[in-house]
Image (tube, rainbow, N blue to C red):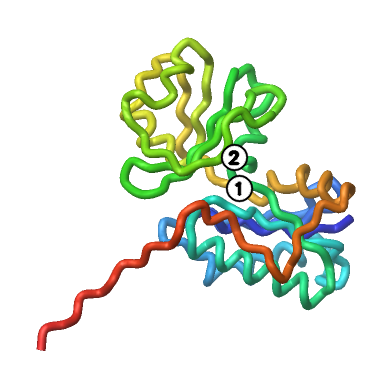
Amino acid sequence: MKILHLETSSRNCSVAISDGTDMLCLCEEISENYKQSESLHTFVQWALEGAGVTLADLDAVCLGMGPGSYTGLRIGASSAKGFCYGLKIPLIAVNSLQTITDRFLGQNYDYVVPMVDARRMEVYTAVYDGNSGEIISDTEAKILDEQSFLDFKDRKVLFAGDGAAKAKEILQLPEAVFLEDVYPSAEFLISRAADQFRRSQFEDVAYFEPYYLKDFHGVKKKKSEE
């Protein structure tokens, strides 16, 4: 099975091509300016060329469904739907927090807590068992304070993601490990996508919406003075 993977929920614009659980090519770039609109389709083209496949060879598209950047998720979802409609192939969706978590499983952490930066002291987060990857606490938008995660103060916990920076400043957890420069990546969609493909766990392309988790709040521009 050849699958195109798109992950656009963060500053990392990430595209991968896989065959089964084998990654054939990965193209990604982390940018402070969220370059998904500029880079995504170029990365898709590069990934296809690097993998030696064409769009016609694809069996499915997998999307990192969020939570994360509202604009990034819309761009990724629109592209994924377009490929699925045009090629008449199924859509697979994976929680983007799992693409942070999966790379750290089995590394002797009691819990892995992915954190994607939101606004002010808020993060998108969940809690996973550090060995099995079983979800302990569901995905949520959480406002951090000194009392957050105190139940873990005597456990070995990894907080990973760009939201871990603000967590490190405020959480009272001396045994915890904080890794800030970690972003969702298409590379870590591959294993879950292959499993969901085998199980025929597909999304309804017409009605699929990314996991925004929160409503979009735009900033109104001030009217210029006449």
Let me know if residue 30 appears in the view.
Answer: no
Is residue 152 shown left or right of residue 108? left
Q: Residue furthest bottom?
A: 226
Q: Position of residue 164 (x, y in %)?
A: 43, 35
Residue at 75 percent of width and 59 percent of height: 203
Q: Which mark is residue 100?
A: 2
Q: Residue furthest left?
A: 226
Q: CA distance from mark 2 to mark 1?
A: 7 Å
Is residue 180 shown left or right of residue 60? left
Residue at 78 percent of width and 78 percent of height: 86
Q: Which mark is residue 65?
A: none
Let me know if residue 72 appears in the view.
Answer: yes
Mark 1 element type: helix
Q: Is residue 17 above or below residue 78?
A: above
Q: Is residue 30 above or below residue 123?
A: below
Q: Position of residue 210 (x, y in %)?
A: 60, 59
Q: Nearer the viewer, residue 39 or 79?
A: 79
Residue at 46 percent of width and 20 percent of height: 176
Sort mark 1 into few (<14), some (14-19) or many (20+) by Cα contacts within 10 Å. many
**Residue where numbered disc 1 is placed:** 96
